Image: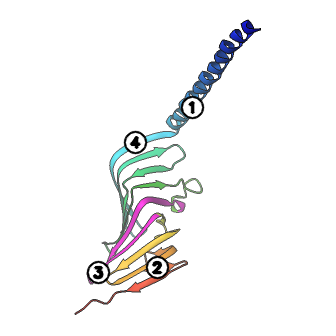
Amino acid sequence: MPKISYLLLPGSLAIALFFIISSFDDRDSSIERSENEFAREFVAFAEGISTELYDEQGQLSYTMNASRQIQLDDDSSELEDPLIRVYRNSRSNWNIEADSGTISAPAEAGADSTRVITMAGDVEIRSLDEHGKTLLITTESVDFLPATEIAETDLPVDFSMQQISQTSLGMRANLASDEIVFLGNSEGRYVQTAN
């Protein structure tokens, strides 16, 4: 009887080692597959991009800069360090800056006006008014619709301008009309400064 137990112990170890090694091989092949899938989707790569987009009247509508852009075969793009400047009357009115961004594929082929630019990671939306006052909105992610110049999010936002600060859960900003709507759980403060 003791001789059989001597054979069972090494046999059990061998079987356990086989399953452990097999599980590592499966993980490595899945990593290879996902890397290959990404390589198939890759179409173009650019560093230091700067794009200008114009409206139907030939006026500069907005510019987009990024340290890196990866174009995918579904006609979407990934951006690093994107900066969007929205113009009105040849003057930069709004800036949207983030750590990363995604330009969606158009909803229909050739319908570029349906694209959405999603900015994510330490998003800052800034505007400088005609009196030199800076308006700042911060959040973690915002969708910008270039065709309508709408920026919106359902995440927490912080708004500040001079002595006014406001927090809210979600916001919709019409950058063309300088109108901001806070969507819920809003709380604001006004701090009066001494003259």
Marker disc for residue 45: 4
Give how far across and how far down residue 33 sits, in percent.
57, 31
Distance from label 3 to label 2 (Cα)?
Answer: 16 Å
Q: Which residue is mark 1?
A: 33
Q: Is residue 1 visible?
A: yes
Pinpoint residue 56: horizontal percent, then vertical percent.
Answer: 43, 68
Q: Is residue 13 above or below residue 189?
A: above
Q: Residue furthest front?
A: 2
Q: Which residues are magenta?
A: 114-140
Front residue of 128/14: it is 14
Residues 95 and 147: in front is 95
- For the residues labelled 2 and 4, say whether their Cβ atoms are less than 8 Å apart: no
The residue pinned by badge 2 equals 180
* Nearest to N terminus: mark 2 or mark 1: 1
Question: Where is mark 3, residue-wise?
Answer: 133
Q: Secondary structure at mark 3?
A: loop
Whichever of labels 2 and 4 marks the residue nearer the N terminus, that label is 4
Mark 3 is surrounded, within 10 Å at the Cα level, by few (under 14), some (14 to 19) or many (20 or more) other residues, namely: few
Magenta segment's dominant SS is strand
24 and 3: which is toward the camera: 3
Residue type for callout 3: Lys
Residue 124 located within the stretch drawn in magenta: yes
Are the residues tagged 3 and 4 within 8 Å (C-beta)? no
Residue 61, percent across and down? 38, 67
Amino acid carrying mark 4 in the image:
Phe
